[in-house]
Amino acid sequence: MEITEVESFPIKLPLESPVSFSNRTLTYRDHAITYVRTDTGHEGVGYSLGYEGAGLIADAVESMLEPLLVGEDPRDTERLWHKMYNGNVQIGRTGLFLRAISTVDIALWDVKAKAAEMPLHKLLGGHSDSVPSYASGGYYRDEKGHEALRGEMRRYLDEGHDIVKMKVGRLSADEEVERVAAVRDEIGDERTLLLDANGVWGSSTEALRNCRAFEPYDPYFIEEPVMIDRVDTMAEVNDGIDYPVATGELEGTRHNFARLVDSGAATILQPDVTVCGGVTEWLKIAHYASAYDVQIAPHYNWNIHASLLGAIENGLWVEYFYRDMDVKAFDDVVADPVKPGDDGTIELPDRPGHGVPIDKDALAKFADD
């Protein structure tokens, strides 16, 4: 089996209204889509959220990675990962270029699992056939007050979720405490509340002041209280509050994740397969974490992360966004997206490949030419 073509291009999925988290407002979601095709007729697909840079990711795939891959056996995922990474290490250790590698590696594993006629989670070890999920939301919109926030959380409980996540950090400390208190009151004491600050606080002093104010409302974790590059500051926060720090959605490669654990900066890791280097690297991160009993709660991309969580022993939860909440839009181009059942559990797809079939007509509709 040989790779004959690698194609990559951006798509742009509009949101009905602007949505904000602590430090950014979005009006659309862009993704880079990558196809790997072979002489045997197998085709794999990978993707990554672009944050307005999907076209650059796609350009990197076609200009820098395709020449390295044509003629290679797509099943040699380990060797090809190192060929892509080591061959471009001067410009591509993390960030945009690592997202490009991620899209290719995901597509390679899709081909590999299809050729083996196995679902990805079975090919990788088959730890579980279903995984728990949490409902992620609590974003900011201009017209959204406490009652709308409560209503959103009630909806998630009605869907069967016992775990919900909300954004914090855009407003003053007192205002954020009021929002967190409202959500805790709405969901009750017996359910799990997660918080996400998206790296908004600029110092350990500021982060600790805010995070300690949330302690009476029993959050299970706080995600990215400070920017991820400030590892020592993150460690100060993790050590200084009575609930854990979770981080990793923007982090790349196992080496950076090892630093997060070794420094005490994170108790829960959140590697994103579309960011950290693809399936090949995501597995290394997860298996490293398992040696220290560190749990994995991956960021976004539930369609593929459900299968990856089903392949490891230390998986915690999959993050899930309801499409009608108009925050994450990728399901618009997925032909058969996974979704939680009435108990918040996601049944894993049993089709060969990574289980994320893409609707090519929808891709054409949202192509960002």
Image (cartoon, rainbow, N blue to C red):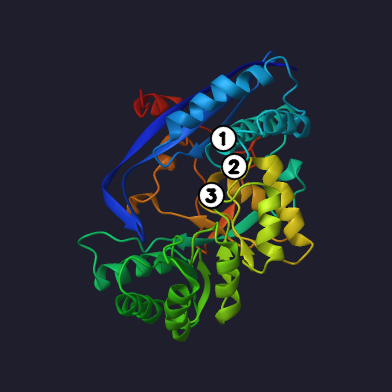
- Give the quadrant of the N terminus: top right
Q: Which mark is residue 302?
A: 3
- Look at 68% across and 39% down and name the residue there: 119
In the picture, measured across the screen, residue 228 lies left or right of residue 286, that is left
Pointer 2 with pointer 1, Cβ within 8 A: yes
* Direction from residue 144 to residue 13 in the image, left or right: right
The one nearer the camera, 100 or 330, is 100
Closer to the camera in the image, 253 or 326: 253
- State the CA–CA distance, disc 2 to disc 3: 22 Å
* Residue of label 2: 94
Q: Within the image, what quadrant is residue 165 found in?
A: bottom left
Q: Are marks 2 and 3 in contact (CB under 8 Å)?
A: no
- The secondary structure type at the circle numbered 1 is helix
- Tag nearer the camera, 3 or 1: 1
Please, which residue is most extreme toward the bottom here?
Answer: 216
Gap between marks 2 and 1, in whole Å? Answer: 6 Å
Q: Residue at x 47, y 69 (%)?
A: 203
Q: Amino acid at mark 3?
A: Trp
